[in-house]
Image (cartoon, rainbow, N blue to C red):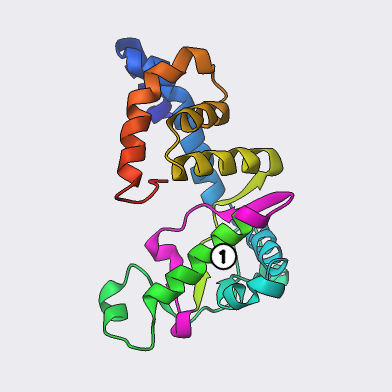
Amino acid sequence: KIIKFVSYIAQIFSPTLRHLQAHKIVDELNGWIMQEIDLEKEALGIDALREYSISFSAGKLQSIFSKVHYLKTYPDYNSKNILVINYVEGIPLNNTDTLKNNPEYDVEQSLKNGIQSIFATFSLSKTHMMLHADPHPANLMIQKDGHITFIDCGLITKIEKEHLAKMRKLLLAVYSQDVYETIKNALIMCNVNHKKYHKKIRKDIIAYLEHTTVSSLGY
């Protein structure tokens, strides 16, 4: 409440913050925090992500998904304040010193398998996509023989079919270095007027696309 109050005050003095509607950003951050600490919701997210990944674990993708793991809950022992999950043996990615000195862990292969699983579901999902939305190093458990487990599932996102299609078009435009299509699809995703904003963001989009030629996509 204090931060939201401050955001309203700040908007009085800052045209930029008024344009960005800072109070709505605070509301969204608050929603993320509340979701992160809701153990019952996290349990549902874990189960949904696990079931979703299983649906891709057969056929040509078996070699990838056989080494990518998700948590398992035990509903009989869970409550509003308690979340019981399976034990995961491994080393968090942020523990770099331990990983470097242990030949049993192939960090590069583990990360490759994890990334491939995400892009496989992103590319092949026909209805929706379940996504672990907080995959920072501490939430990636590196395991032996190239295995990896996504942990801390407080932020699980369901991307609906419509938004998934828009994201695919945007990523294809970025990959193709197509300035016009990148602007067009970015504005569509933001649900704002193309005629009003495309000239305003063109310079930033060009700089961003140049950046992606020598670095990551930046997402």
Residue 13: quadrant of the picture? top left
Of the 4 image quadrants, the one containing the N terminus is: top left
Which residue range is magenta in the image? 123-146
Could you tell me the amino acid type at mark 1?
Ser
From this view, report whether residue 182 is shown above or below residue 147.
above
Mark 1, secondary structure of its residue:
helix
| Residue position for label 1 | 117
**What is the x, y in percent for residue 173?**
50, 39
Q: Nearer the viewer, residue 106 or 131?
A: 106
Q: Exactly how many numbered labels are in the figure?
A: 1
Residue located at (49% from left, 44% from top): 33
The residue shown at (45%, 84%) is: 144
Residue 132 painted magenta? yes
Q: Looking at the image, which residue is at 36% across and 51% down?
A: 216
**Residue 124 sits in which quadrant?**
bottom right
Q: Is residue 171 magenta?
A: no
Residue 4 percent location from the top left of the image: 42, 26
Badge 1: few (under 14), some or many (20 or more) residues near its Cα, within 10 Å?
A: many
Q: Nearer the viewer, residue 16 or 153?
A: 16
Q: Is residue 104 left or right of residue 152?
A: left
